[in-house]
Image (cartoon, grey):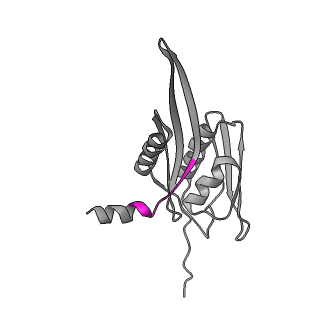
């Protein structure tokens, strides 16, 4: 049973997007915790994000990975790109993602590049406008990917 679980865990790739040090004033001094934002994906259409908090960095990352694996979504991929253009507003961020021709690569900035790469999209272009907050941008990109609809391929009639 443990061997099957290890094989299942190995197929996902993990990338840490952001680690924040959070300090809070308490009567005895400062209370310091760490927050980690992680993306998990299999490069075949599944991707998830998670946030974890802990007193040290490694436990925070492990909690974030666990949450990201629980919240995986399926991303429709058409010819190694996105099936159609999408524009979405999420909190302060405005995200625009659109498909790109084969061989053009990922022409998106910030966290969107990592998320699309781990989702398995190798050709796309896009823009993030309005927000520099990486956490908000990450959630905005995920909302945009959730709204994508798979492209139906037509069969040639004989």
Q: The magenta stretch spans which residues? A: 9-16
72 shown above or below 23: below
In the rendered view of the protein, which quadrant contains the C terminus? Answer: bottom right
**Residue 88 visible in the shown view:** yes
| Marker count (numbered) | 0
Residue 95, by quadrant, is top right
The residue positioned 65% from the left and 33% from the top of the image is: 92
Q: Position of residue 38 (x, y in %)?
A: 53, 47
- The residue drawn where x is 70% and y is 71% is 102
Q: Nearer the viewer, residue 25 or 65?
A: 25
- Residue at horizontal 61%, vertical 68%? 80
Closest to the observer, 83 or 6: 6
Q: Which residue reaches farthest bottom?
A: 158
The picture places residue 93, in percent across and down from the top left corner, at 66, 38
* Residue 120 falls left or right of residue 52: right
Does the rendering let one see residue 86?
Answer: no
Q: Residue at x 59, y 67 (%)?
A: 78
- Please tell me whether residue 101 belongs to the stretch shown in magenta: no
Magenta includes 11? yes
Q: Residue furthest left?
A: 1
Name the quadrant of the N terminus: bottom left
**Residue at far top of view:** 27
Image: 32 above or below 107: above
Indicate left or right for 27 with 3 as reference: right
Residue 108 vertical placement versus 128 (above, below): below
Task: Please tell me whether residue 23 is drawn above or below residue 155 in the rendered image.
Answer: above
Q: Quadrant of residue 155?
A: bottom right
Q: Whole-percent x and y of residue 56?
A: 48, 36
Q: Where does residue 45 sit, x and y in percent of width and height? A: 51, 62
Q: Nearer the viewer, residue 66 or 87?
A: 66
């Amino acid at each position: 049973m443990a061997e099957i679980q290890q094989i299942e865990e190995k197929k996902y790739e993990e990338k840490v997007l952001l680690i924040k040090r959070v300090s809070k004033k308490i009567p005895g001094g400062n209370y310091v915790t760490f927050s980690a934002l992680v993306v998990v994906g299999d490069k075949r259409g599944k991707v998830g994000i998670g946030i974890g908090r802990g007193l040290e960095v490694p436990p925070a990352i492990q909690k974030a990975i666990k949450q990201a694996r629980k919240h995986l979504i399926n991303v429709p991929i058409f010819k190694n790109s996105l099936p159609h253009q999408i524009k979405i507003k999420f909190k302060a961020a405005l995200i625009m993602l659109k498909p790109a021709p084969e061989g053009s690569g990922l022409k998106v900035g910030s966290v969107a590049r990592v998320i699309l790469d781990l989702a398995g999209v190798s050709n796309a272009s896009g823009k993030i406008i309005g927000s520099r907050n990486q956490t908000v941008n990450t959630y905005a990109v995920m909302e945009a990917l959730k709204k994508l609809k798979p492209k139906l391929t037509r069969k040639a009639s004989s």
